[in-house]
Amino acid sequence: MWVQALDVILEKMKASGFDFSQVLALSGAGQQHGSVYWKTGASQVLTSLSPDLPLREQLQACFSISDCPVWMDSSTTAQCRQLEATVGGAQALSCLTGSRAYERFTGNQIAKIYQQNPEAYSHTERISLVSSFAASLFLGSYSPIDYSDGSGMNLLQIQDKVWSQACLGACAPHLEEKLGSPVPSCSVVGAISSYYVQRYGFPPGCKVVAFTGDNPASLAGMRLEEGDIAVSLGTSDTLFLWLQEPTPALEGHIFCNPVDTQHYMALLCFKNGSLMREKIRDESASRSWSEFSKALQSTEMGNGGNLGFYFDVMEITPEIIGRHRFSAENHEVSAFPWDVEIRALIEGQFMAKRIHAEGLGYRVSKSPKTSEFPEKCSRVSRAGMVLKLALSAWCQGSSSRQPSVWGEAVRAEALLGLGGVIPKSSSSLLRGALHHAQLTFPASRHFLNGRGSRWSRLRGGHRGLKHLFVFKYSLPKTKILATGGASHNRDILQVLADVFGAPVYVIDTANSACVGSAYRAFHGRSMDGGQMSLKELGALAGLRSVKGEIGMFPFFRDIGVLGALASFFSLPAEQEVETKVKASDPSSPGPWTAPWGTIALVEASLKLWIIKKSPPCRQVLAGAAHAHKGVLPPICCQRLPGGTALLCLPKPKPVPSPSTAVPTPRHISHFIWRSVLQLGPGRNLTGSQCVDEWRGDHVF
Ligand SMILES: Nc1ncnc2c1ncn2[C@@H]1O[C@H](COP(=O)(O)OP(=O)(O)O)[C@@H](O)[C@H]1O
Ligand SMILES: O=C(CO)[C@@H](O)[C@H](O)COP(=O)(O)O
């Protein structure tokens, strides 16, 4: 089915006139934890695919297991207990692999297959995750598993990034050779197979960047910052955070970070997500999302004290099943009126998310008030000075490419614009300002395009640098970034905002895993050590022609610096960009020439990024669909050599885990109750998040 899905996607893209020759790199994402079993001899078939036939016809006999286990499988409890016992208990396994044993995690699935079908196992030459399987199809050979998706197997030592021999041994024999060595998530795993070159017209040099799990890809696509919380409302609901230090516990998962190999991500998975919402919609809202929304609109926040938890299938976080409704008097009741039922479901789902996220150490936090924002930042002349200093620092340093050249510009920026906000010690000053430049980057695009909503109004609607500061310092620190199918529903998102007491943002495509795959393709290609000419960058940015070759520059490193710089510019049209490149700003000769041209191009590539609809089927071809139009990933900005060097990471240390007791509905009720009480007097959810605030057409 998956092989055929790829055939279908590619044929549809071909039929729609997609120009495969423009694809420089691709990556993709797959549901986490699922596994594919390649039969002995399959690699031979993979390397000699005939371009005249669809993949499905050629790969049919390549698998030793025909029904692949996917993440919803929960049949491996016995294997889980066995694995935990082997390594010294659930917490020990969590410290080692980032999670206690979970039924859907691949090591336990493999152990079950080995135990129940040893013959099939012995005829298996390679085991892939869904992600590395899809990458293998593009490569025409087996793709390694990336660290991030590999963390969802209960097999990878997340700190050392190697397979745990103890875990491998507990699951099945010869497992290491069947898995291959794991690789960093941004690795280029090879060039695309000649099959795709001949059949679809991909360029032979097109790079395949390691594929990863859907949630890690979403983290990349949503450009999570520390303090943000991402909520994915797909088939399952997940909630994830960017973490600097792993904090393995008995609840939730720690995965290697798909963007930065030294960092981590925390994830909570809720099995009763969209499918549960669909059930209640069908039962209580005539199978209509708009009726469902009406119920949310017509009921009060807090639901008059009525609470409900709906777990039609055994939940993962926490392990519990059944529907449990509590009246305002805290009595268990068997039914609610239809509209109360709908609000109870959505509030219950989000309150559970908040309470479990807080269990992971997550706190909703607020920034200083807007009034504390230094008035002098608002002067556009000062913005110009900052810009000039930043640019001149860049020019001086352009030959050495050292991040230290940023010191001057950053210091100037801090003095002019951020005095009093960033600590004065020089290293933190630099770090803070770099961070600032990178983080405000998307915001600047938003405001310079004149599309700011609430934040523009706050400061009078002027355009200019001040918006960057207003944005950065007036938002509550916590942002909730929503994605997945149900993030299309603003009434559901409103409840999310109310329960967390923080603004919720969506990206312009609900499929953040797709966008993340495109970012990662770009990231991987740029990390590949190659040099890229301005012309090539121009092509990547979608410019028709780039006049005046300015020279080569190391692609990855400088694009981050330039990207941050480019955030100060508003160069709207492609044509204007070309004019600027040609004219190179005659009023500023000499060293200004190069940066003007280059920055203009970078800005152009930002403006032109993607905005193409995702391919008809999800994720797999994300990189291909997006990379061709020039994605300038903020992950590059975040991963400046200077930025990386400046982030000194303390040694990770595990934190004590919460109680192992399986919570009863009553426990959960109390948990949730506590969360409601925390939200404000009279059990009113704060309700401060009006529509404008939580969904300001925000473009990340
Ligand atoms: N308007 C809507 N309101 C609520 N849920 C929606 C809406 N549109 C789609 N969905 C839900 O989105 C789910 C699919 O989400 P998606 O992120 O595509 O899934 P997956 O996690 O499998 O990638 C569907 O199950 C559907 O219930
Ligand atoms: O199991 C998890 C995460 O640990 C799931 O999130 C899967 O990664 C796929 O989920 P859907 O895309 O089907 O919602």
Image (cartoon, rainbow, N blue to C red):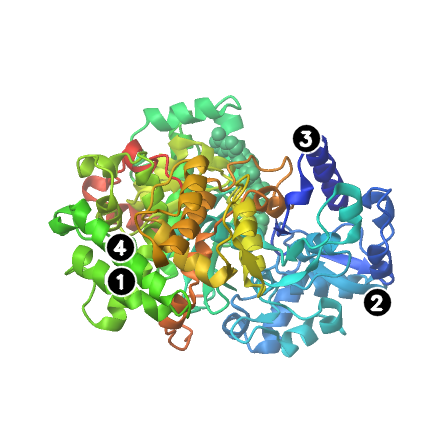
Residue neighbourhood size for the residue with mark 1, other residues' Cα within 10 Å, grouped as few (<14), some (14–19), many (≥20): many
Pointer 2 with pointer 4, Cβ within 8 A? no
Image vertical order of residue 347 relative to residue 73, above or below: above
Tell me how far mark 2 sits from mark 1, CA to CA: 59 Å
What's the amino acid at mark 4?
Lys
* Front label number (2 vs 4): 4
Q: In the rendering, which numbered label is found on residue 410?
A: 1
Q: In the rendering, which numbered label is found on residue 16?
A: 3
Q: Quadrant of the C terminus?
A: top left
Tell me how far mark 3 sits from mark 2, CA to CA: 43 Å
Query: Residue at image x 67%, y 53%?
Result: 206
* Front label number (4 vs 1): 4
Q: Which residue is mark 4?
A: 388
Tell me how far mark 1 sits from mark 3, CA to CA: 47 Å
Q: Which residue is mark 2?
A: 122
Pointer 4 with pointer 1, Cβ within 8 A? no
SS under mark 4? helix
Tell me how far mark 2 sits from mark 4, CA to CA: 66 Å
| Residue 381 picture location, percent across and down | 18, 47
Q: Is residue 99 visible?
A: yes
Query: Residue at image x 18%, y 51%?
Result: 382
What's the amino acid at mark 1?
Val
Q: Quadrant of the N terminus?
A: top right
Q: Earlier in the sequence, mark 3 or mark 2?
A: 3
* Front label number (2 vs 1): 1
Image vertical order of residue 261 relative to residue 61, above or below: below
